[in-house]
Image (cartoon, rainbow, N blue to C red):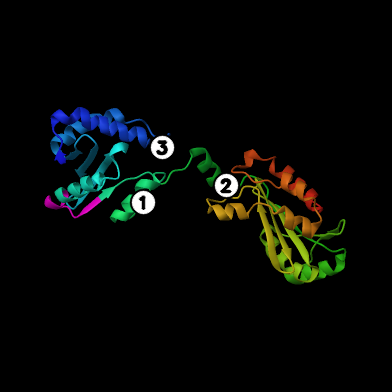
């Protein structure tokens, strides 16, 4: 039976509120405000909407505006669930707000509480605003201006240095510096030219790779085979911002592809071209840049 709580019910109301907090804890960086909540509940029983479902469920709502009610909490003990008590509680809260002139009901739910979010979605609640969080240290790092060098080169799988020089000069519309290595020709280029230059040179040369160091913090390579990008690696996939999980995975090195096109040892590719959530979890970026170049068999 759904009924309004009274002052005599305060111990039960607090007990159910505590049970909710224990089962669905707040994010660890937030201060414990349980004592403050308990103090407010005494006022809420008197001035707001506090409903009980016998001794098994609790719903608390408060008025936030002329048209708006807010569902502070709905909780049903685990052993009393799957009987529709939560729906009954919320329906009664909604009814009382409607009678008081409100036509909207809002609530907050942790993003991690997927079960509750699915229920609320089924009931018709839709997102109104999002509360976002970021670790201060990560935020400082991401927003800091670039402090380290950004440079790189394109490496073309050919010994025909003069042809690469002509093709690169034509594409960049200037004279370029090239040098030869063991089966590769290295082309100096500006950081923002690397990807496009590597792709274009691969149309005739077959295989090319743009390898660069960015912000003195992360290493990237982009591998092309006859104009098609076949692999891209970024040592810290989310260095420039959060990505969908699939994109994070895609920015890891593919040792099989790299080995097939460059004759690199796939075990070495896997060991050296690792990814991490922060540059601090990897070797210093310039050292990693040299290691990756060595694994690919190109000049750093």
Residue sticking out furthest to the left? 99
Q: Is residue 128 visible?
A: no
Crowding at label 3, few (<14), some or many (≥20) Cα neighbours within 10 Å?
few
User: Which residue position holds label 1?
Assistant: 118
Q: Residue at x 84, y 59 (%)?
A: 184
Give the magenta-colored segment's residue range. Answer: 97-105
Who comes first in sequence, dot 2 or dot 3? 3
Q: Residue at x 54, y 52 (%)?
A: 245
Q: Quadrant of the N terminus?
A: top left
In the picture provided, is 184 more to the left or to the right than 124? right
The question of residue 243 being in magenta is answered with no
Tag 2, which secondary structure?
loop
Say if mark 2 contacts mark 3, CB within 8 Å.
Answer: no
Q: What separation in Å lies between label 2 and label 3 (alpha carbons)? A: 30 Å
Q: Position of residue 11 (x, y in %)?
A: 21, 27
Crowding at label 2, few (<14), some or many (≥20) Cα neighbours within 10 Å?
few
Instruction: Tell me if residue 265 comes above or below residue 174 in the rendering.
Output: above
Who comes first in sequence, dot 3 or dot 1? 3
Tag 1, which secondary structure?
helix
Q: Residue at x 69, y 62 (%)?
A: 230
Give the foreground label among 1 and 2. Answer: 1
Q: What separation in Å lies between label 1 and label 2 (alpha carbons)? A: 40 Å
Instruction: Tell me if residue 191 comes above or below residue 286 in the rendering.
Output: below
User: Which residue position holds label 3?
Assistant: 27
Give the foreground label among 2 and 3. Answer: 3
Q: What separation in Å lies between label 3 and label 1 (alpha carbons)? A: 20 Å
Say if mark 3 contacts mark 1, CB within 8 Å.
Answer: no
User: Which mark identifies residue 131?
Assistant: none
User: Which residue position holds label 2?
Assistant: 145
Q: Position of residue 150 (x, y in %)?
A: 68, 51
Say if mark 1 contacts mark 2, CB within 8 Å.
Answer: no
């Amino acid at each position: 039976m759904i009924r309004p709580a009274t002052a005599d019910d305060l111990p039960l109301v607090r007990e159910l509120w505590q049970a909710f907090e224990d089962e669905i804890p707040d994010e660890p960086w937030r201060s414990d405000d349980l004592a403050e909540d308990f103090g407010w509940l005494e006022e809420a029983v008197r001035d707001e909407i506090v409903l009980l479902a016998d001794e098994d469920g609790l719903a608390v709502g408060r008025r936030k505006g002329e048209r708006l009610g807010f569902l502070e909490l709905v909780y049903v003990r685990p052993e009393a669930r799957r009987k529709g008590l939560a729906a009954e509680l919320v329906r009664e809260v909604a009814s009382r707000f409607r009678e008081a002139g409100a036509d909207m009901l809002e609530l907050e739910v942790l993003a991690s509480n997927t079960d509750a979010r699915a229920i609320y979605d089924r009931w018709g609640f839709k997102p109104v605003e999002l509360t976002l969080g970021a670790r201060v240290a990560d935020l400082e790092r991401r927003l800091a201006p670039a402090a380290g060098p950004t440079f790189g080169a394109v490496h073309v799988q050919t010994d025909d240095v003069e042809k690469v020089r002509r093709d690169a000069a034509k594409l960049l519309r200037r004279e370029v510096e090239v040098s030869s290595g063991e089966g590769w020709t290295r082309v100096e280029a500006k950081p923002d030219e690397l990807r496009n230059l590597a792709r274009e040179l691969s149309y005739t040369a077959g295989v090319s790779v743009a390898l660069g160091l960015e912000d003195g913090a992360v290493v990237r390579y982009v591998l092309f085979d006859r104009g098609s990008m076949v692999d891209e690696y970024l040592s810290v996939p989310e260095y420039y911002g959060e990505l969908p999980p699939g994109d994070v995975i895609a920015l890891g090195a593919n040792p099989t592809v790299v080995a097939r096109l460059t004759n690199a040892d796939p075990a070495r590719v896997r060991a050296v071209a690792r990814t991490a959530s922060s540059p601090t979890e990897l070797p210093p970026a310039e050292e990693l840049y040299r290691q990756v170049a060595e694994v690919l068999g190109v000049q750093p």
